[in-house]
Image (cartoon, grey):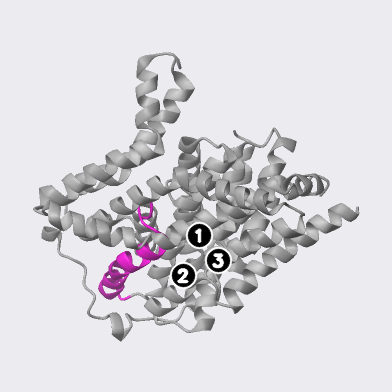
Amino acid sequence: MDSQFWIICVLITSIILIVISIVKCKLHPFLALLLASFYVGGLMGMAPLKMINAIESGVGGTLGFLAAVIGLGTILGKMMEISGAAERIGITLQKCRWLSPEVIMVLVGLICGITLFVEVGVVLLIPLAFSIAKKTNTSLLTLAIPLCTALMAVHCIVPPHPAALYVTNALGADIGTVIVYGLTVGLMASLIGGPLFLKVIKNKIPFKTVPEAFSDMKVRTEEELPSLSSTLFTVLLPIVLMLIKTAAELNMDKTSPLYSILEFIGNPITAMFIAAFVAYYILGIRRNMGMATLLTKTEDCFSSIANILLIIGAGGAFNGILKESGLSDGLAGILSHLDMHPILLAWLVAIILHAAVGSATVAMMGATAIVSPMLALYPNVSPEIITLAIGSGAIGCTIVTDSLFWLVKQYCGATLSEIFKYYTSATFIASLIALAGTFLLSYII
């Protein structure tokens, strides 16, 4: 009992240390996670050299796979941005008269969000919400909130997004399966948490026009944009290649040469590598961009991913310390005696960490470290389901600790109270719906 009490105390105080370091002391999450790693290692009695080795292997093991995927994905997202491909999708969906503006924003967020970091997606796609709000004379809140909710959902539960890919890899889940189920759950959660929720309370939503500071932001004309076919081909290519790999694993003889080829091109690194060069050609060179321009844009986008790489690397270090110190195994034994379903536990840990730390990425990595030792105790629950449960939790509780909260507030020109009432509520409802969808899937697969 004493050892169990000590394990719980070390874990809880390490999380508190991370929260205080980030929220109160304004320490970068990279430093906060490393600090917590040394803290856990010291209190669990690890030898100094063993502690350093665990941190090194944690960082290397995590970034060895993810760094290449994140770098290639960033190139793909940058090409979407500079070519206007994301705007093409939005303009095309606007022509579907049977879709409401709110549903259009959800679909734009889900499709474009596959290749864009959530904050980049908000900045890139919010002018589209401004344009539709002006044309339809509707409140900006009713368009921006569905868009941002969908971007958050796809960010948390659909690989190749970094955090979703990290959890998928760490838990040994099949990436193709996670993509298919993640998009399904994400669509359902976004539609209910966004448009449906806002429709229920439509009489309470204040009318918000485009803030004056952003009134000069314009959506490009159709003539300036790439075609829809080339846009969708580029966006969906890596997803299709990864799904082909999953289909091959389920249906093909694993000794055949064709299987080896499909396994190779469907690997996330290979798939994103192919997609990056396709984007260079279709969205760049074919649209009269020279290689010098593409080189400059690539260098610009690489400078923006240092932050996410450092955070993910430090998250891997924290995960490595939890495992090597024996805390993970001890925690698994404690959690196995709780009368709580592992799906609910994974969701709860992720949503609490997101609210506390303010980063969905950090929350998902922390939840993975806490929950993963339990998987062996629940062989009937697949790693794909636990991956979705962790991502579902990270969708919710977008509050003042999260930079996304302030970004949405700024672009909507809303008060603090209004963003809490509408955007925080929307992400929380989406998180609950995603949890329900994950439970439903657990009975199917």
Q: Is residue 8 above or below residue 262?
A: below
- State yes or no: residue 129 in magenta: yes
Q: Nearer the viewer, residue 93 or 407?
A: 407
- Residue at numbered disc 3: 31
Stretch of the chain drawn in magenta: 113-137
Which numbered mark, 1 or 3, is in the foreground of this view?
3
- State yes or no: residue 206 in magenta: no
Q: Residue furthest front?
A: 49
Q: From the top left corner, tell me how far across and down residue 100 is, in percent.
A: 35, 61
- Residue at numbered disc 2: 404
Q: Residue at x 45, y 53 (%)?
A: 154
Provide the major secondary structure of the magenta segment.
Answer: helix
Q: Residue at x 22, y 59 (%)?
A: 297
Residue type at tag 2: Leu
Label 1 element class: helix
Q: Is residue 379 above or below residue 119?
A: above
Q: What's the CA distance linking mark 1 and mark 2?
A: 17 Å
Instruction: Answer whether residue 434 is visible to the viewer in this image.
Output: no
Q: From the top left corner, tell me how far across and down residue 165 is, in percent.
A: 48, 46
Counting other residues with Cα less than 10 Å from the Cα at mark 2, is it few (<14), some (14-19), or many (20 or more)?
Answer: some
Name the quadrant containing residue 33.
bottom right
Residue type at tag 3: Leu
Label 3 element class: helix
The label number, if any, that marks residue 439 in the structure image: none
Q: Nearer the viewer, residue 91 or 371?
A: 371
Q: Residue at x 60, y 34 (%)?
A: 444
Q: What's the CA distance linking mark 1 and mark 3?
A: 8 Å
Q: From the top left corner, tell me how far across and down residue 72 is, in percent.
A: 33, 48
Q: Earlier in the sequence, mark 1 or mark 3?
A: 3
Which numbered mark, 3 or 2, is in the foreground of this view?
3
Residue type at tag 1: Ile
- Residue at numbered disc 1: 311
